[in-house]
Image (tube, coloured by chain):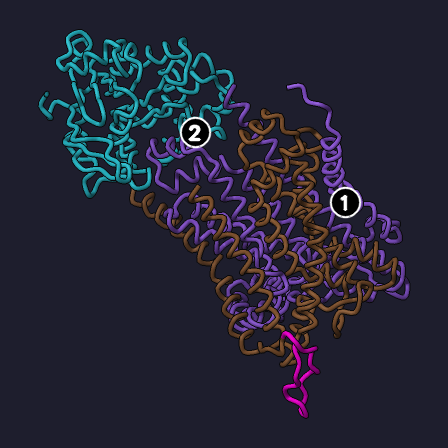
Chain colours: A brown, B purple, C cyan
Amino acid sequence: MKATRRIVDKVLLSLTTVAVIIAIVPLVAIIFYVTVKGISAISIGFFTELPPLPASKLQPSPPGGLGNAVQGTLILVGLASAIGVPVGVLSGVYISEYGRNAYGNAIRFLGDTLVGIPSVVTGLLFFGLIVLTFRSYSVIAGSIALGTLMIPIVSNTTAAALQAVPNSLREASSALGVRKWRTSLLIISHAQSSIATGCLLAVARIAGETAPVLLTAGASNYWYSGLGAPIASLTYYIYNYAVSGTSNWVNLAWAGALVLMVVVMGINLVVRLVTRKKYTYG
Amino acid sequence: MARKFSKVDSIFRFLVLAVASAIVVLTVIYFYVLIKDSAVTLRTGLAFITGSTWNEEKGIFEVLPELYGSVVTSAIALLLGVPVSIGVAIFLSEQCPRRLRFPISFLVEMLAAVPSVVYGLWGLIVLSPLLEYKVYPVAQSYLGFLPIFRGRIFGLNFMTAGIVLAIMMIPIVASISKDALMAVPDSQREASYALGATRSEAVRMSVLKYARPGIIASVFIGFGRAFGETMAVTMLIGGAPDIPKSLFYPGQTLASLIATSYADALTPAYRSAVIEAGLVLLLVSFLANVAARTWIVRVTKGREAASFA
Amino acid sequence: MSASNEAKMNAVSLNAWYGAKQALFNVSLDFVPNKVTAMIGPSGCGKSTLIRCLNRMHELVPNTRITGKVLLDDQDIYSQGSDPADVRRRVGMVFQKPNPFPTMSITDNVVAGLKLSGVRDKKRLTEVARNMLERVYLWEEVKDDLKRSGASLSGGQQQRLCIARALAVEPEVILMDEPCSALDPIATAKIEELIASLKEIYTVIIVTHNMQQAARVADYTAFMYLGELVEYGETSQVFESPKQPLTERYVTGKFG
């Protein structure tokens, strides 16, 4: 074989290694900066206090935290899950257990497609439907928008989890004369950990959403004050403080990013390690 | 085996059917509401996306610069991100030692878990100064003969937004492409090796060609994501509604227009313009996803049919 | 066994492993040039592993290793300086399931290997494609539609296309790993006819689970069992007067 062919082979094969390095360097850099800059700005007060004033000559490091933002994100994600999880799981059940027909395929197809729609569009939808109608940003609008984003994700992962349950179980169950709905519940309980996994990943995803939250839940510098009122969120403060140019606010943005990353990456890490184990050991 | 008709069965069936229909209803609502709420600017027809006038007093809102920004930043992201993603996919599917496959694909997938706003924060404070002072000047000294790399260098510009979009696109494109590559039967690789192909030749002559529909679909899906990505781009593109010759100048995208102006949109025409910008995003990303999925289905169906003929 | 200098290929004390599992035990075997040698034996006997060792396809499976030598014209194909890609050009292979490249036309399938070695001349490529398709008796069936995908042919045609593809790189030895197991009887008959004609130019080594097929096409037959070579000789001898009791029980259908 000609030497050039051998060299071309070596070069091309090492290019893919370079690609892997290029892909991983940003991740490492982001984790590094968020950790280093975030840790120095984090304290107990971060979770318990309201946002500080901007730093000034008189007061170079005014006290304060993002307690209201942590609270707001928890409330929004909690309420969104209350919408997204049941709707998503049930529609996943339909797709997997009842959807072997054109309508089921259409739902599956639209579900796949909805996952790819920019979240800002969902924000805009409920901005138009709820915020403009009631003339106020609100927890309700924010939760519905985030819950809507969860539905196709949860539905897809649930359908996939159910379809992974061996068909023999369904057949065994119906052969015993068990009714279809009971069989479905049996299948669901069999796949419950994969379904929970999918829900957790959806939670991780929406916890990091910014644009749809801005457009629906708005922002607030205070604690939660009712379902009909705007509410603070971590992502809003990360965005707003990052672009503020004020040093103590930028530091808080890093701290907020650290908290968010720990939660979001933590969920992903645990879920993937656990599911991997399951796949490897049967 | 005679089973009585079960009421609970039909109730349960109806329940899941009704809930699943939420996805269909939702799809319809997306289009219906966005079309209804953008009626004012929709009446101006194509001028909305072909004109550049933005005049609040006269109520003229046209978004060609924003459309340009979305297209250009997505194009940069594709140009930079797709080769890297395909490289990653090839590495994972064809070269990676088994022990490393999980940790590496895990790390790459973690890129998708980083929230958009964190990309924005990192891009704004860490990456953009680095690019502005260390990378862009060098790039300009070599590529300055091209108009797109000429002129003054800003830190927040099309290029910075495009680069971060490329990073954000990698996990999506790489994982779909990887699935496509791993679905290529080993008999195809063996066929190439048996003809005396080197590893890279086997990848090029059989594996990549066989997996091409899946890879193209991954690019469509990646494009759909990049086109509608909002926060990172809003924080990194600089926010100037212009169509400059240089990629080192600040710009604006449809998504960043929405994120920065929804709160100021107090007149019906202004509000309609912001919502129509969302409608364009919806249409483009919807079509990109539909294209990707029908493409995969059509091509793979044809192939299976052919191989059993 | 015959002296090595007369053989086209020799396996010398060959052992092969998949991970910790040993698949071949000390196999030594000489392949006579311009003859068809069949490897028979029950499934799992190591016959496929053996021929995959003959062109270094075995090592493509992760965690495999071998010891011993495989000589091709008295040169060890596993020696330091030997390149697997070069070995595979000289020792071509046809697989159990036809595996044409579905994205390539019939012509492109045939000349795929040739293009790898840098042949770009259109005229030459079409010429080779035609010659090879004629050699595998496929030309008349496909000549009006050479632009069709290789995957659009019938199973038997696909397998002949794969043989043409293997021949186009001008190998010296052709390995066939159960080439007819996915085919119907008529297609099988065509391939067997083809194999008989191939030995004029090439040394052919075929793995088959079908004893009648071995009896029909092979000049020499090797019987393997549990990774060991039990008996090797002229086909008529192996089938009619086997020396080993195990061979006799196998060829008379008592097990396997």
User: Where does residue A81 sit, x and y in percent of width and height?
Assistant: 68, 54
| Quadrant of the rendering where the N terminus of chain C is positioned | top left
Q: Nearer the viewer, mark 1 or mark 2?
A: 1
Magenta stretch holds residue A227: no
- The amino acid beneath tag 1 is Leu
Residue occupying the point 74% across, 41% down: B19
Q: Chain of mark 2?
A: C
Label 1 vs label 2: CA separation? 56 Å
| Residue B223 location (% of width, % of height) | 63, 49
Residue A275 as seen in the image, left or right of residue A140: left
Q: Chain of mark 1?
A: B
Residue at (43%, 29%) from the top-left corner? C122
From the image, tell me which residue sits under label 2: C122
Quadrant that contains the C terminus of chain C: top left
Give, as a single range, the part of the protein colored magenta: A47-65
Whether C20 is drawn above or below A248: the answer is above
Q: Say the numbered circle drawn on residue C126.
A: none
**Total numbered badges shown on the rendered structure:** 2
Q: Main secondary structure of the magenta part?
A: loop
Depth check, front residue: C95 or B12:
B12
Magenta residue check for A60: yes
Query: Left or right: where does residue B45 sit relative to residue B67?
Result: right
Task: Give how far across and how far down residue C199 sits, in percent.
Answer: 25, 16
Location of residue A50 by image quarter: bottom right
Q: Which mark is residue B26?
A: 1
Please, what secondary structure does the residue beneath circle 2 have?
helix
Q: Amino acid at mark 2?
A: Lys
C-beta proximity under 8 Å, tags 1 and 2? no
Which picture quadrant has residue B236?
Answer: bottom right
Residue A91 place in picture, x, y as percent: 69, 40
